[in-house]
Image (cartoon, rainbow, N blue to C red):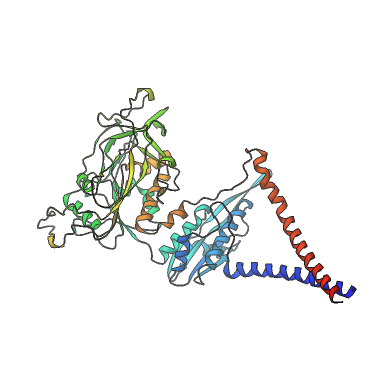
Amino acid sequence: MPSKKLSTRANAYLGVLTLLVLIAAIGVISEQFLHRRLDLTRDREFTLSSAALKTLDGLPDRITIRAVISKDLPSQFMPIRTRVEDLLQEFQARSNGKLNVVYEDPGADPQKQQEAMSLGVQQVQLQEQSEGDMQIKKGFFGLALVYGDKKEVIPVIQDVETFEYDLVVKLKKLTGSSKTLGVIEGSPGSQFTFTLPGAEGKTNVGFEQNFTDLKQEIEKLYKVETPDLAAGPIPDDIDLLFIAAPTHLSELEKFRIDQYLMKGKSAIFLTPGIDIDLTSLRGQPTQNGYEDLLARYGLGVRKNVVLEPQHWQLVRFGNSFFPTPYPYWINVDYTTMSASSPITAKLQAISLPWTSSVEIDTTLQDSSDVQVLARTTPGSWEETDGFYFVPKDLQEYVPIAPRSFPLAVLKTAKFKSLYADRLPPSDSAHPIDTAQVLKVAQGKASVLVISNALFATDFYVGYTGATPNLMLILNAIDQLALDPDLINIRSRTLDEAAIDETKKNSARLPVTLVNMALAPVLLLLIGIIIGVRRRNRENSGEART
């Protein structure tokens, strides 16, 4: 009997040891070869997005990521470094061998430091805070992606929240899968013009000068071109049009845009209904000449200004600050933005100054899909004349016929050409083959109309800090031109889902008890299973004897 009990005990120990070895083996295989993780975070922050997976699956050949990361980083950078290295490891594991991550630490070696900087990775000064002391360290925290003779660089990894998006964008640019955005700003003299307030009164003209920050963000992934509409049709390699609030479009320019849309392609229109003079704070209706083009597609921008009684911004003109509501500057938050559209689903708020409203023609029978992406609250009203925007007390405004006004509308349909019932413009300098005119769209196209342009300028975004305004346009470009899944990466945030300390103890108690009891309960269950198996074996042995 002692030998049988000893044998049974040995079998039990061997079973436990086998179980531990099996668990460890599964972990090693999963980490080294499959790199799969159980992601229980609220927003699945440790799961690669579908855009990242599609990009990795589509890599044409082997790409090397040279991660230049100093080992001696300040302690506050350690969690960020861990997240970055973990994501790089997962990218490599899911690339089917086409992505090779190499870690480099230049240390104090001047030659290695120079090599890192020649890659484009910057050496930065980092502060390390300790008790009663602060030290300044120099280090590297960036990477370069190398593909043949091409290279894309993240000089300094500054934001771990956008790191996955940055990697996907760099991979797409590196492998030539980026697309082209065609910017239409009108002929010289018809470009969007904005005079900055102040004594100098500098005037910015056109897309390049007014939307510099937006252009830089777009160029992270897209090629930006300005097609010459007088020279001929818009090239087929342009994937999306961006109509950058021209003050006027000629008949020929409208025809080029119309025929581009008839090919089943899409366009974003920044179309203000009112021109604003910041010196006098007065406005007048725009006369841009392409109202009939938008009307043909069942959309329009009213010559009005919408006022918002609930969501507004405080405003400062010159050295004067007005703490009272300024209903001409509208904050549109998530409650009045479309939650079903990827363009606006994860935006918290956008800000629109002196904005008009979008009209939707519901009488057209074009089997269209119309989405109102942003609107005001139901208590808003409009002004249609006498535009004078000097701030005053909210009680002095007189709401007339309050209702909700659409401010950004996306329509998708097989549009009918503006030139279906009349000949397009033609002259000896710009001959047009009328036989080639498309009168009905070859496929469904999308037209996004935003009834404002100032909201995306460097001046307004810098003045108000309304960076989500740029995100609205970038999301729309991704949705209409490239990959809607990119939106979900850009909008991703990394936050701590800690237990809310403001809640009652009764609300936190179950979570605390589960955390405390789970591990002991699992160990107890394993012990019971082993004990039952051992008793059964002993009983069966005694029965045989």
Q: Position of residue 121 (x, y in %)?
A: 50, 60
Towards the viewer: 517 or 272: 517
- Image coordinates of residue 2 in percent, x first then y, are 90, 73
Residue beneath the point at 20% across and 51% down:
254
Q: Quadrant of residue 18?
A: bottom right
Instruction: Determine the residue positioned at 38% across, 23% down.
Output: 395
The foreground one among 102 and 386 is 386
Quadrant assignment for the N terminus: bottom right
Image position of 98 (left or right of 522): left
Residue 261 seen anywhere in this rendered image of the structure: yes
Q: Residue furthest right?
A: 2
What is the count of numbered marks?
Answer: 0
In the rendering, at what x and y percent does residue 381 appear? 32, 31
Most foreground residue, 486 or 401: 401
Indicate whether 299 appears above or below 423.
Answer: above
Question: Which residue of the protein is positioned furthest toward the left in this rendering?
Answer: 428
Rendered-image quadrant of the C terminus: bottom right
Q: Residue furthest front?
A: 543
Residue 538, quarter of picture: bottom right
Q: Position of residue 346 (x, y in %)?
A: 45, 48
Picture quadrant of residue 372: top left
Q: Is residue 318 visible?
A: no
Residue 30, placed above or below residue 317: below
Question: Please, is residue 12 above or below residue 135 in the view?
Answer: below
